[in-house]
Amino acid sequence: MDNINTIALSRLAAQTHAMDVIAGNIANMSTPGYRAERTVFADWLVQEPAGSEPAGGRTLAFAQTRATYRERSEGTLTQTGNPLDLALSGDGWFTVQTANGTRLTRAGRFTLQKDGSITDENGNALLDTSAQPMQLSPADTDLTVKADGTLRSQNGVIGQIAVVVPNDPNRITAEGSRLFRADVPTTPVARPKMLQGMVEDSNVQPVAEIVRMIGTERDFQFVTQMVEAEGQRRQNAIDKIAAPPAG
């Protein structure tokens, strides 16, 4: 088994995945409600068979991507003045109805459709506290949203926009850049803080991401150079062994 190159390959694969994650963050730094991804690496330990103990011990440590998670910090809130641009301060997620079921989102840029429904940028209906699509009548024009999600028009209360949290905040799966699937039941937020006329920006910090990208690229280059040096060392050894005897 080529231990040096195999271990180096595991490291290169992990760094490639990290670079993909960082590139995705940079690509979505202007996406409303986007949560930056982070990778967690760990050692994968392999016990060598007896009789071929390498220098330093008989355990080999390969690199592996243990997990990828989303940062939970809030993005900056930007005021837009649009009555259906909504942002959440603190914990909580909006719920929208998609073709694959209910999904969570922090991207609060909503639009009123001709049929009276309120949808996100992908056409998914915004849900109320009864898990039903919010529905307006043609006469509802002057819209206000209270901090608890209550939507009113000049004609009175229309409904209350749902704000929920997963029972386990780590058990959510991203679907694209704006939607998340809750893999556990959700619970309504007791006292949500919804802000009208504002949107939550991505929580990606561009300078920090670029620094991470440069560091990841340098690590990749270092491992690549090590592999090349090891290949050259082996070739030199082969050349010496295969060289005809002098004289």
Image: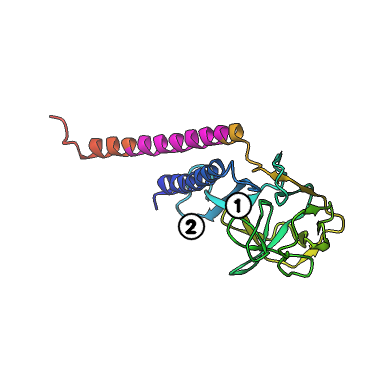
Residue 49: mark in rendering: 2
Q: Main secondary structure of the magenta part?
A: helix
Q: Nearer the viewer, residue 9 or 122?
A: 122
Residue at 83 percent across and 54 percent down: it is 192
Residue at 55 percent across and 40 percent down: it is 26
Label 2: element kind = loop
Give the magenta range.
210-231
User: Where is residue 105 drawn, in percent x and y?
Assistant: 67, 56
Considering every residue shown, the one lying at the far right of the view is 191
Q: CA distance from mark 2 to mark 1?
A: 32 Å
- Residue hosting label 1: 68
As drawn, 207 above or below 86: above
As drawn, 228 above or below 105: above
Considering every residue shown, the one lying at the far front of the view is 139
Query: The disc labelled 2 sits on which kind of residue?
Result: Pro
Counting every numbered tag in the picture gives 2
As drawn, 190 above or below 82: below
Q: Nearer the viewer, residue 77 or 167?
A: 77
Q: Is residue 161 left or right of residue 107?
A: right
